[in-house]
Image (cartoon, rainbow, N blue to C red):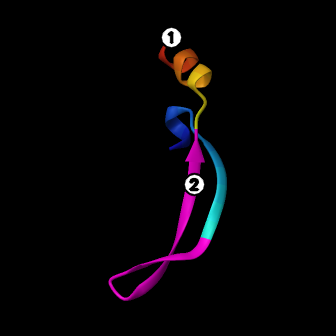
């Protein structure tokens, strides 16, 4: 995700259950102006 210009924001710990297992999620974001700058 960081290779395409996104910024790591936070890890949501034990927030989702998948296949009877608790999972954590990493949240990434990108601002519109950052996305436009990356396309150049």
Q: Is residue 14 magenta?
A: yes
Q: Which of the two labelled residues, at mark 2 and mark 1, occupies the earlier sequence position?
A: 2
Is 7 rendered above or below residue 19? above
Q: Which residues are magenta?
A: 13-29
Q: Residues within 10 Å of mark 1 (few under 14, many from 20)?
A: few
Residue 6, image x, y percentages: 57, 38
User: How many numbered discs?
Assistant: 2
Q: Residues within 10 Å of mark 2 (few under 14, many from 20)?
A: few
Q: Nearer the viewer, mark 2 or mark 1?
A: 2
Residue 21, image x, y percentages: 42, 86
The residue positioned 56% from the left and 60% from the top of the image is 26
For this orientation, the residue located farthest to the right is 9
For the stretch drawn in magenta, what is the main secondary structure?
strand
Is 12 rendered above or below residue 31? below
Asked if the residue at tag 1 contacts the one at tag 2, i.e. Cβ–Cβ closer than 8 Å, the answer is: no
Q: Which residue is mark 1?
A: 40
Q: Quadrant of residue 12?
A: bottom right
Q: Which labelled disc corresponds to residue 26?
A: none
Is 34 rendered above or below residue 20? above
Q: Secondary structure at mark 2?
A: strand
For this orientation, the residue located farthest to the bottom is 20
Residue 29, image x, y percentages: 58, 42
Is 11 rendered above or below residue 20? above
Q: Is residue 22 magenta?
A: yes
Q: Which residue is mark 2?
A: 27
Question: Left or right of 17: which side holds 6?
Answer: right
Residue 23, image x, y percentages: 49, 76
Q: Secondary structure at mark 1?
A: loop
Question: Left or right of 19: which side holds 9?
Answer: right
């Amino acid at each position: 995700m960081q290779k395409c210009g996104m910024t790591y924001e936070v890890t949501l710990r034990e927030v989702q259950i998948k296949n009877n297992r608790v999972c954590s999620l990493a949240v990434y974001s990108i601002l519109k102006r950052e996305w436009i700058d990356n396309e150049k």
